[in-house]
Amino acid sequence: MKRSALFAIALVALIAVGAGGYYASQGEPEAATEAGPAAESAPDAHVDLATLLMPGPLPDQAMGDANAPVTVVEYASLSCSHCREFHDETLPEVKSRFIDTGKVRFIFRDFPLDQFALAGAMIARCAGDGKYFPIVDAFFTQQESLLGAQDPLAWLQNFGKQVGFTQESLEACLSNRELEDNLLEVRETASGKFGVNSTPTFFFNGKIRRGALTLEEFEKEVEALTK
């Protein structure tokens, strides 16, 4: 069998057995959706920070000083337009003003809403050290072309090659059932233990904020924790 056919089979398995099977068993995706503009959570909407930061099945992808006074955890889906909005419009300034200056440690966790976000997260994880965030950025940048693609399989193949994969390494990545299961476990923990039901969802030292935050909204949360 040709490798292109094997790749197609691997992607179909990812869709039908992985993400699709997970969503069906959990009653998703209706219970997990994109969030719109940021909305205030209830004043007592907190989770325990130590519990939130406990090691999971995959190492966290983080930026910033581990000893920063504020730890922000974002759960996002690579297919979520509001997540793209935050990463394109707000995160660069957040990085400059808060992450690079030692005020914030920023942790990004995948919460895939569909099979394409799951595939993108797998590609970012397979890429190796130092390449996760650049690939996440590239996926968000090209997100609209994926959602409008007539052949998503071809789109994923092209994207993988753009970010340094060969056909063989891309097939191996998207066929990695252990990685797939670990990503879905991160998502299930977020949903079941931390109340994540939309993307993006942020935790500021455990305080929950939902929706795409503006720079001003992000700054307000950081300032409240550093006064």
Image (cartoon, rainbow, N blue to C red):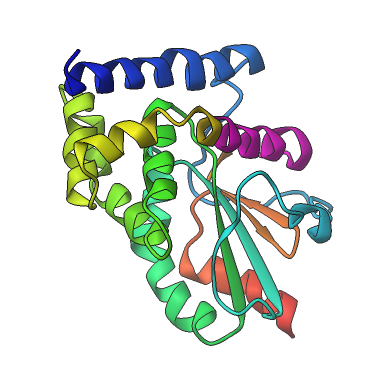
Residue 98 screen position, x and y as percent: 53, 80
User: In terms of image quadrants, where is residue 53?
Assistant: bottom right
Furthest residue in direction front, as rendered = 1
Nearest the viewer among 166 and 185 is 166
Q: In the image, is 141 to the left or to the right of 204?
A: left
Q: Is residue 101 above or below residue 142?
A: below
Q: Is residue 70 above or below residue 11?
A: below
Q: In the image, is 28 to the left or to the right of 124?
A: right
Marker count (numbered): 0
Residue 135 screen position, x and y as percent: 33, 54
User: In terms of image quadrants, where is residue 48?
Assistant: bottom right
Q: Is residue 106 above or below residue 122?
A: below
Q: In the image, is 85 to the left or to the right of 215?
A: left
Q: Is residue 186 above or below residue 105?
A: above
Residue at the location (59% across, 36% down)? Answer: 182
Q: Quadrant of the C terminus?
A: bottom right
Nearest the viewer among 145 and 222 is 145
Q: Quadrant of the N terminus?
A: top left
Q: In the image, is 144 to the left or to the right of 205?
A: left
Magenta residue check for 128: no
Residue range of the region highlighted in magenta in the rendering: 181-197
- Mainly helix, strand or loop, the magenta region? helix
Residue at the location (52% across, 40% down)? Answer: 35
Residue 19 screen position, x and y as percent: 49, 22
Residue at the location (60% across, 80% down)? Answer: 65
Residue at the location (74% across, 65% down)? Answer: 205
Q: Is residue 201 visible?
A: yes
User: In terms of image quadrants, where is residue 87?
Assistant: bottom left
Q: Is residue 197 visible?
A: no
Residue 118 screen position, x and y as percent: 44, 34
